[in-house]
Image: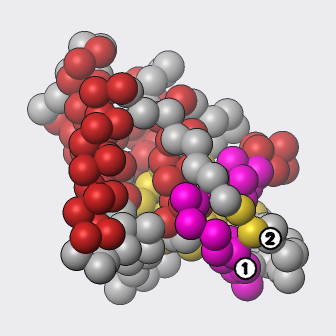
Amino acid sequence: MKLAYICSPCRGDYEKNIIKAQEYCREAMNDGLLPLAPHVYFTQFVDDTNPEERKLGLRCGLQLLRHCQLIRVYGCKVSAGMYDEIQLAGVLDIEIQVFGPPEFIENVLEIYNHAAVTQRRPLRKHAVSAAAAYADQPAAAPLLAEAGKSLREVTAVHINIDPTEASELGEMIANSLKNGTSMLRGGA
Protein backbone atom coordinates (compact mmCIF):
# COMPACT_ATOMS: atom_id res chain seq x y z
CA MET A 1 0.00 0.00 0.00
CA LYS A 2 1.47 3.35 -1.08
CA LEU A 3 1.73 6.16 1.45
CA ALA A 4 0.01 9.13 -0.25
CA TYR A 5 0.59 12.69 0.92
CA ILE A 6 -2.60 14.76 0.63
CA CYS A 7 -1.75 18.32 -0.43
CA SER A 8 -4.69 20.73 -0.33
CA PRO A 9 -5.51 24.18 1.07
CA CYS A 10 -5.88 24.64 4.83
CA ARG A 11 -6.22 28.38 5.39
CA GLY A 12 -8.98 30.54 3.98
CA ASP A 13 -12.26 28.79 4.72
CA TYR A 14 -10.57 26.61 7.35
CA GLU A 15 -13.52 24.39 8.35
CA LYS A 16 -14.56 23.77 4.75
CA ASN A 17 -10.96 23.01 3.72
CA ILE A 18 -10.46 20.49 6.55
CA ILE A 19 -13.71 18.71 5.60
CA LYS A 20 -12.55 18.59 1.96
CA ALA A 21 -9.16 17.21 3.04
CA GLN A 22 -10.95 14.47 4.99
CA GLU A 23 -12.93 13.64 1.82
CA TYR A 24 -9.68 13.48 -0.17
CA CYS A 25 -8.28 11.07 2.44
CA ARG A 26 -11.35 8.85 2.13
CA GLU A 27 -11.03 8.92 -1.67
CA ALA A 28 -7.35 7.95 -1.44
CA MET A 29 -8.19 5.10 0.94
CA ASN A 30 -10.89 3.89 -1.45
CA ASP A 31 -8.21 3.91 -4.16
CA GLY A 32 -6.08 1.52 -2.07
CA LEU A 33 -3.71 4.17 -0.72
CA LEU A 34 -2.68 5.03 2.83
CA PRO A 35 -3.50 8.76 3.03
CA LEU A 36 -1.45 11.23 5.05
CA ALA A 37 -2.89 14.74 5.44
CA PRO A 38 -0.72 16.67 7.90
CA HIS A 39 -3.08 19.66 7.89
CA VAL A 40 -5.91 17.43 9.13
CA TYR A 41 -3.73 15.79 11.78
CA PHE A 42 -1.54 18.66 13.02
CA THR A 43 -4.41 21.13 13.35
CA GLN A 44 -5.75 18.91 16.14
CA PHE A 45 -2.97 20.19 18.42
CA VAL A 46 -1.15 23.00 16.54
CA ASP A 47 -2.69 26.47 16.28
CA ASP A 48 -2.60 27.32 12.56
CA THR A 49 -3.33 30.98 13.37
CA ASN A 50 -0.12 31.25 15.43
CA PRO A 51 2.74 31.96 12.95
CA GLU A 52 5.36 30.02 14.94
CA GLU A 53 3.14 26.98 15.40
CA ARG A 54 2.06 27.12 11.75
CA LYS A 55 5.70 27.20 10.63
CA LEU A 56 6.46 24.18 12.83
CA GLY A 57 3.44 22.31 11.43
CA LEU A 58 4.49 23.05 7.84
CA ARG A 59 8.05 21.93 8.56
CA CYS A 60 6.83 18.69 10.13
CA GLY A 61 4.60 18.11 7.10
CA LEU A 62 7.60 18.46 4.78
CA GLN A 63 9.47 15.89 6.87
CA LEU A 64 6.56 13.46 6.54
CA LEU A 65 6.42 14.03 2.77
CA ARG A 66 9.93 12.56 2.52
CA HIS A 67 8.49 9.15 3.47
CA CYS A 68 5.67 9.14 0.92
CA GLN A 69 5.64 7.39 -2.45
CA LEU A 70 2.91 9.62 -3.89
CA ILE A 71 1.61 13.17 -3.52
CA ARG A 72 -2.00 13.95 -4.41
CA VAL A 73 -2.61 17.65 -4.97
CA TYR A 74 -6.16 19.05 -4.80
CA GLY A 75 -7.65 22.49 -5.25
CA CYS A 76 -8.09 25.49 -7.51
CA LYS A 77 -5.19 27.66 -6.32
CA VAL A 78 -1.74 26.80 -4.94
CA SER A 79 -1.19 28.22 -1.44
CA ALA A 80 2.28 29.04 -0.05
CA GLY A 81 2.30 25.83 2.00
CA MET A 82 1.19 23.75 -0.97
CA TYR A 83 3.87 25.36 -3.14
CA ASP A 84 6.65 24.14 -0.84
CA GLU A 85 5.12 20.64 -0.67
CA ILE A 86 4.80 20.38 -4.46
CA GLN A 87 8.32 21.68 -4.97
CA LEU A 88 9.82 19.25 -2.45
CA ALA A 89 7.94 16.36 -4.10
CA GLY A 90 9.55 17.36 -7.40
CA VAL A 91 13.01 17.49 -5.83
CA LEU A 92 12.49 14.09 -4.20
CA ASP A 93 11.10 12.59 -7.42
CA ILE A 94 7.86 11.55 -5.71
CA GLU A 95 5.04 10.46 -8.02
CA ILE A 96 2.36 13.14 -8.40
CA GLN A 97 -1.37 13.14 -9.13
CA VAL A 98 -3.24 16.43 -9.52
CA PHE A 99 -6.98 16.99 -9.09
CA GLY A 100 -8.64 20.23 -10.13
CA PRO A 101 -9.36 22.55 -13.05
CA PRO A 102 -6.94 22.52 -16.03
CA GLU A 103 -5.20 25.80 -15.16
CA PHE A 104 -4.57 24.55 -11.60
CA ILE A 105 -3.16 21.28 -12.93
CA GLU A 106 -0.87 23.16 -15.30
CA ASN A 107 0.37 25.42 -12.48
CA VAL A 108 1.03 22.49 -10.13
CA LEU A 109 2.91 20.51 -12.77
CA GLU A 110 5.00 23.56 -13.67
CA ILE A 111 6.04 23.95 -10.00
CA TYR A 112 6.75 20.21 -9.73
CA ASN A 113 8.64 19.90 -13.02
CA HIS A 114 10.78 22.97 -12.42
CA ALA A 115 11.81 21.91 -8.94
CA ALA A 116 15.48 21.15 -9.41
CA VAL A 117 18.11 19.23 -7.51
CA THR A 118 21.60 20.32 -6.48
CA GLN A 119 23.16 17.44 -8.37
CA ARG A 120 22.56 16.96 -12.09
CA ARG A 121 19.95 14.32 -12.82
CA PRO A 122 16.92 14.10 -15.09
CA LEU A 123 13.55 14.68 -13.51
CA ARG A 124 11.27 11.68 -13.33
CA LYS A 125 9.34 10.87 -16.49
CA HIS A 126 6.08 9.67 -14.99
CA ALA A 127 4.01 7.43 -17.19
CA VAL A 128 0.78 9.25 -16.55
CA SER A 129 -2.08 10.18 -18.79
CA ALA A 130 -4.98 12.57 -18.71
CA ALA A 131 -7.94 10.85 -17.11
CA ALA A 132 -11.62 11.53 -17.48
CA ALA A 133 -13.63 12.60 -14.45
CA TYR A 134 -14.80 9.63 -12.43
CA ALA A 135 -18.44 9.86 -11.43
CA ASP A 136 -17.82 7.43 -8.56
CA GLN A 137 -15.17 9.72 -7.00
CA PRO A 138 -17.07 12.79 -5.82
CA ALA A 139 -14.21 14.49 -3.97
CA ALA A 140 -12.18 15.11 -7.12
CA ALA A 141 -11.55 13.77 -10.60
CA PRO A 142 -8.01 12.59 -11.35
CA LEU A 143 -6.41 14.75 -14.01
CA LEU A 144 -2.80 13.91 -14.67
CA ALA A 145 0.07 15.09 -16.85
CA GLU A 146 0.24 14.06 -20.49
CA ALA A 147 2.03 10.77 -21.04
CA GLY A 148 5.50 10.72 -22.51
CA LYS A 149 6.48 14.36 -22.06
CA SER A 150 10.24 14.68 -21.74
CA LEU A 151 11.42 16.61 -18.72
CA ARG A 152 14.66 18.57 -18.82
CA GLU A 153 17.72 17.98 -16.68
CA VAL A 154 18.20 20.50 -13.94
CA THR A 155 21.08 21.78 -11.82
CA ALA A 156 19.67 23.91 -8.99
CA VAL A 157 16.95 23.87 -6.35
CA HIS A 158 14.83 26.69 -5.02
CA ILE A 159 12.71 25.95 -1.96
CA ASN A 160 11.47 28.74 0.30
CA ILE A 161 13.28 28.07 3.58
CA ASP A 162 13.48 30.26 6.65
CA PRO A 163 17.14 31.28 7.29
CA THR A 164 17.15 29.53 10.69
CA GLU A 165 15.98 26.31 9.02
CA ALA A 166 18.57 26.61 6.24
CA SER A 167 21.38 25.61 8.61
CA GLU A 168 19.41 22.51 9.68
CA LEU A 169 18.91 21.57 6.04
CA GLY A 170 22.61 22.15 5.36
CA GLU A 171 23.52 19.81 8.22
CA MET A 172 21.11 17.17 6.92
CA ILE A 173 22.65 17.36 3.44
CA ALA A 174 26.20 17.24 4.84
CA ASN A 175 25.35 14.20 7.00
CA SER A 176 23.65 12.56 4.04
CA LEU A 177 26.74 13.03 1.88
CA LYS A 178 29.10 11.95 4.68
CA ASN A 179 27.10 8.75 5.29
CA GLY A 180 26.89 7.97 1.59
CA THR A 181 23.11 8.15 1.62
CA SER A 182 20.98 10.35 -0.56
CA MET A 183 18.30 12.51 1.00
CA LEU A 184 17.29 13.57 -2.50
CA ARG A 185 15.31 10.39 -3.19
CA GLY A 186 11.73 9.82 -2.14
CA GLY A 187 10.31 6.70 -0.58
CA ALA A 188 9.90 5.03 2.76
Q: Is residue 24 left or right of residue 166?
A: right
Q: Quadrant of the C terminus?
A: bottom left
* Amino acid type assigned to the residue bearing label 1 in the image: Lys
Q: Is residue 25 left or right of residue 120?
A: left
Residue to which mark 2 is pinned: 151
User: Residue, x 44% and y 67% (percent of image)?
Assistant: 184
Mark 1: few/some/many CA within 10 Å (<14, 14-19, 20+):
some
Mark 2: few/some/many CA within 10 Å (<14, 14-19, 20+):
few
Up the image or down, 42 lies above or below 135; here it is: above
Q: Position of residue 23 (x, y in %)?
A: 44, 52
Disc ID at residue 25: none
Up the image or down, 135 lies above or below 10; here it is: below
Q: Which residues are magenta?
A: 109-127
Residue to which mark 1 is pinned: 125
Q: Is residue 47 in sight in this rendering? A: yes
Magenta segment includes 116? yes
Q: Position of residue 70 (x, y in %)?
A: 48, 70
Q: Mark 2–mark 1 contact, CB under 8 Å?
A: yes
Q: Residue furthest top?
A: 50
User: Residue, x 64% and y 69% (percent of image)?
Assistant: 120
Magenta segment includes 104? no
Secondary-structure class at tag 2: loop
Q: CA distance from mark 2 to mark 1?
A: 7 Å
